[in-house]
Image (cartoon, rainbow, N blue to C red):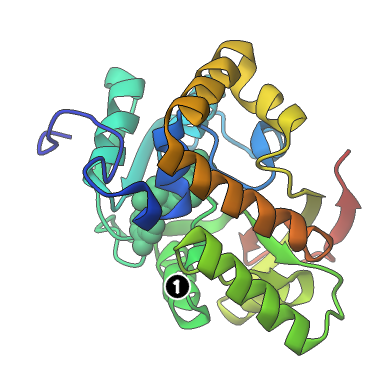
Amino acid sequence: MSDHAAAQVPLAGRRAEDLPAHWLLARLGKKVLRPGGKQLTTRLVGMLPLRDADVVELAPGLGLTAKLLLEAGPASYIGVENDADAAALAAASLGARGEVTIGEAKSTGLADASCDVVLTEAMLTMHTNAQKGEILDEVARILRPGGCYAVHELALVPDDIPIETAEDVRLSLVRSQKVNTRPQTTPEWIALFAAHGFEVEHVVHAPMRLLHFRRLLADEGLRGTLHIAGTYLRDADVRRRVNTMRAAFRRNEKHIAAIAIIARRAAASTPDTEEAP
Ligand SMILES: C[S@@+](CC[C@H](N)C(=O)[O-])C[C@H]1O[C@@H](n2cnc3c(N)ncnc32)[C@H](O)[C@@H]1O
């Protein structure tokens, strides 16, 4: 990766009140930007056949999961991230062990059938269903037959959530997060994967507790949490936004959950569904 400016938190010049939630949290000092936190990521990564595999991560963000993937001994790692500053930060955290390109998930520029595992966290949910489909088609194109696509995203619960409630939840999240947020029920996620040539093998749920204190401590550690608390106390604009986001998460807590899915190209099995602690 050669065409990146010096690494800085994305959208550093934008007012806190206009920042998309993930970059607001990054400004706060938060590094884990996905709904099920590090615990669900670790579980998901642990279920993937990574050793000696060619691995692609779409939207590596600040590069935390990339480091975890590299620890599993893949043959190669490529991240594809559409924010240049995030790509620079992710690349800096990897050194020579992997490559991060600035690009779009729906058109990665990677060769057909060139990887074994693709991973995405907290990115598909930010896209419309049509865009999600384009990204799934791109993943199907770059995966070798039998390869895995693993995602860690946001689900609506319960499966039979009334349409009006689902729409209220989406609107409330879009307004408070200032980013497109299109979570779906678990059957909708599974159907979307099936419609694009994937067979879902595993589904795991975890509570969506991104801004709960205990999750913060688990994700960011004591030093990270103290740093976040310091920024929160010092910066009134950031504090206001975080409070609004946290209120929206709490208001919708019964209707949102983290979901991890592992799907495979051309492998027959029935999905098993389980709950993470
Ligand atoms: C909520 S953050 C999650 C970052 C990281 N995956 C994590 O879980 O910590 C969403 C990330 O997706 C990236 N992104 C959004 N849309 C994208 C797209 N169409 N192609 C590539 N990256 C995208 C953003 O720049 C950001 O890094």
Residue sitting at the far top: 223
Q: Which percent across, then down, holds residue 253?
A: 79, 58
**Quadrant of the image occupied by residue 249:** bottom right
Q: Residue at x 46, y 57 (%)?
A: 143
**Quadrant of the image occupied by residue 167:** bottom right
Q: Residue at x 37, y 47 (%)?
A: 16
Visible in this render: residue 118? no
Q: Which percent across, then down, holds residue 33?
A: 53, 41
Q: Nearer the viewer, residue 182 or 225?
A: 225
Q: Which percent across, then down, holds residue 60?
A: 42, 42
Residue sitting at the far front: 236
Cβ of mark 1 under 8 Å from ligand 1: the answer is no
Numbered marks: total: 1
Viewed as shown, does residue 225 lie left or right of 57? right
Q: Nearer the viewer, residue 48 or 152?
A: 152
Tag 1: amino acid: Asp
**Quadrant of the image occupied by residue 131:** bottom left
Q: Which residue is mark 1?
A: 137
Q: Nearer the viewer, residue 166 or 249?
A: 249
Q: Residue at x 47, y 56 (%)?
A: 144
Which image quarter holds the C terminus? top right
Viewed as shown, does residue 5 lie left or right of 179? left
**Secondary structure at numbered mark 1:** helix
Viewed as shown, does residue 114 lie left or right of 53? left
Which image quarter holds the N terminus? top left
Visible in this render: residue 109? yes
Q: Residue at x 87, y 81 (%)?
A: 160
